[in-house]
């Protein structure tokens, strides 16, 4: 099956620093990738939709200047948490939708990145 | 706007018995897909089953079946012959078509506990 990787799998950073998380589709091209955040024992909350070559679409309430998303190629999207604070500590999951996919298509999830801000 | 509701925060089932996890949804898009995912404690999202809005028959995948009642806007997951390894968090999700930008939103989830 299709594989999506995320790097790093976990990261600890100090408050005020920035952290970049990479999401790669390893064996397929993905025009669209999604970034989710999941707090402990809660559901996945969609943060933004990332489209290759264009600006990301952020969900209401998500600060676009704080969570910078870049989708520079059909296999790579990055999420940068700028000036991280302890409340940004969470599990970040990316998901990739194969190009030419539709409502019926399965999307593939990365294994997630656990961010802890101290 | 699309909406997914899972009203069962936790469910218990005896090993080898069947269990139904509830999911209701709301959308104005006639074209949509409904998904169920399993998330064990490791955090990975495991795809279980898919139902399309135009599918006439209920989807089945091994021990998983989806009880799709379109008029009621419900898409309940049925797990037959529960196993200890089925203990996990289960999420119902929906993706709309073009009008929804293909984004998928998730319900609050149901934690399933399988008892030996």
Image (cartoon, grey):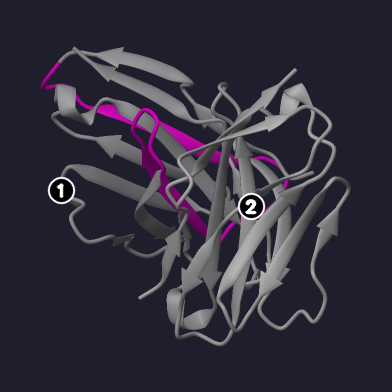
The N terminus of chain B, quarter of image: bottom left
The one nearer the camera, A54 or A12, is A12
Q: Judge whether residue A74 can be spotted in this image.
A: no
- Which residue is found at the position 33% from the left and 22% from the top? A115
Question: Relative to B110, does residue B116 appear above or below in the rendering?
Answer: above
**Label 1: chain letter:** A
Q: Which of the 4 image quarters holds residue A11? A: top left
- Which residue is found at the position 65% from the left and 69% from the top? A101
Q: Secondary structure at mark 2?
A: strand
Q: Secondary structure at mark 1?
A: loop
Give the labeled residue for mark 1. Answer: A65
The spot of residue A16 in percent (x, y) is: 11, 22
| Label 1 packing within 10 angstroms: few (<14), some (14-19), many (20+) | few
Give the labeled residue for mark 2. Answer: B36
Taking the image as shown, residue A50 lies to the left or right of residue A83, namely right
The spot of residue B52 in percent (x, y) is: 69, 73
Taking the image as shown, residue B42 lies to the left or right of residue A79, namely right
Question: Relative to B22, does residue B71 appear above or below in the rendering?
Answer: below
Camera-nearest label, 2 or 1: 2
**Label 2: chain letter:** B
Q: Which residues are magenta?
A: A15-43
Q: Which of the 4 image quarters holds residue B83? A: top right
Is A17 part of what is drawn in magenta? Answer: yes
| Label 2 packing within 10 angstroms: few (<14), some (14-19), many (20+) | many
- Which residue is found at the position 66% from the left and 79% from the top? B53
Q: Are marks 2 and 1 in contact (CB under 8 Å)?
A: no
Tell me the CA gap for discs 2 and 1. Answer: 32 Å
Q: Which of the 4 image quarters holds residue A116? A: top left
């Amino acid at each position: 099956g299709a594989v999506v990787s995320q790097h790093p799998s976990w990261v600890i950073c100090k408050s005020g620093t920035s952290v970049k998380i990479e999401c790669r589709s390893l064996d397929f091209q993905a025009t669209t990738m999604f970034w989710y955040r999941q707090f402990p024992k809660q559901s996945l909350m969609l943060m933004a939709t990332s489209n290759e070559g264009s600006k990301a679409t952020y969900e209401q309430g998500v600060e676009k200047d704080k969570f910078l998303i870049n989708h520079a190629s059909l296999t790579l999207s990055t999420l940068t948490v700028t000036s991280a604070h302890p409340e940004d500590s969470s599990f970040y999951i990316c998901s990739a939708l194969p190009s030419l996919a539709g409502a019926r298509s399965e999307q593939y999830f990365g294994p997630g990145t656990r961010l802890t801000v101290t | 706007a699309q909406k997914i509701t899972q009203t069962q925060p936790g469910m218990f089932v005896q090993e080898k018995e069947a269990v139904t996890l509830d999911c209701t949804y709301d959308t104005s898009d006639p074209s949509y897909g409904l998904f169920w995912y399993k998330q064990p404690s490791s955090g990975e999202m495991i795809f279980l089953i898919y139902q399309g809005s135009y599918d006439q028959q209920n989807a089945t995948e091994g021990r998983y079946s989806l009880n799709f009642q379109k008029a009621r806007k419900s898409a309940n997951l049925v797990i037959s012959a529960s196993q200890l390894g089925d203990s996990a968090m289960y999420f119902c999700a929906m993706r709309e078509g073009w009008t929804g930008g293909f984004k998928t939103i998730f319900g609050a989830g149901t934690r399933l506990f399988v008892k030996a």
